[in-house]
Image (cartoon, grey):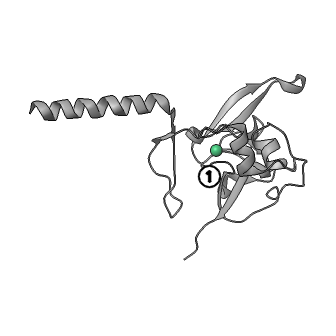
Amino acid sequence: MIPALFASLLFLTAAMAQESAAPVVDVVLLDQMGNSLPVQAVKKVIKTDEEWRTQLGNGEVYQVARGKGTERPFCGAFHDTKQTGVYSCVCCDLPLFRSDAKFDSGTGWPSFFQPVAKENVVTEIDRSHGVTREEILCARCDAHLGHVFSDGPPPSGLRYCVNSVSLKFGPQATE
Ligand SMILES: [Zn+2]
């Protein structure tokens, strides 16, 4: 009884120590069919600048996703795509947007009226370029995705304006 209690205390202490070392975040992952799983805590993906450059290269993907850049409109791979599937984070694969939330905003950037789950996309006030905007970031790795505006279509009235290079597309499995 007592050794068991001691062992479980040790386990708890170890688990807590590990937790404080690696920050966690609540996100929604998808099953193989693309259905949302319950909200779960996952470790944040934290890499050095060097590691990101190794993974992403030094080109536009790195400049936009890690350097908060913006790709030119009407040039991105996904501004005009209508295929069914899921758009995930180019840096850490977290599912971010579903194709059924995509709409043609006419802006030249892929636009969505809602994320896969509110947990997966976080916002931060961005005061760069003399304007106040709401930046959108991947909740798991803090990749820059784009900005969210309040001129979107129903049901949300929001427009998530995303850089194609911040996204990876996975077509839905068809049976
Ligand atoms: Zn990410």
Q: Residue furthest bottom?
A: 175
Q: Is residue 64 above or below residue 172?
A: above
Q: Quadrant of residue 14?
A: top left
Residue 12 image offset from top left, x and y in percent: 30, 31
* Quadrant (top left, top right, bottom left, bottom right) of the N terminus: top left
Residue 132 image offset from top left, x and y in percent: 81, 24
Report whether the residue tagged 1 is closer than 8 Å to ligand 1: yes
Q: Is residue 132 above or below residue 115?
A: above
Residue 171 image offset from top left, x and y in percent: 65, 66
Q: Which residue is mark 1?
A: 93
Packing grade of label 1 (10 A; few <14, some 14-19, many >=20) is: some
Q: Which residue is rendered at x = 55% and y = 38% of the image? A: 44
Q: Which residue is rendered at x = 69% and y = 40% of the image? A: 143
Q: Quadrant of residue 75?
A: bottom right
Secondary element at tag 1: loop
Residue 119 image offset from top left, x and y in percent: 56, 38
Q: Which residue is rendered at x = 10% and y = 30% of the image? A: 2
Q: How many marks?
A: 1
Which of 12/145 is in front? 12
Side (left or right) of 55 relative to 64: left
Side (left or right) of 72 relative to 134: right
Side (left or right) of 134 relative to 30: right
The amino acid type found where label 1 is placed reads Asp
* Quadrant (top left, top right, bottom left, bottom right) of the C terminus: bottom right
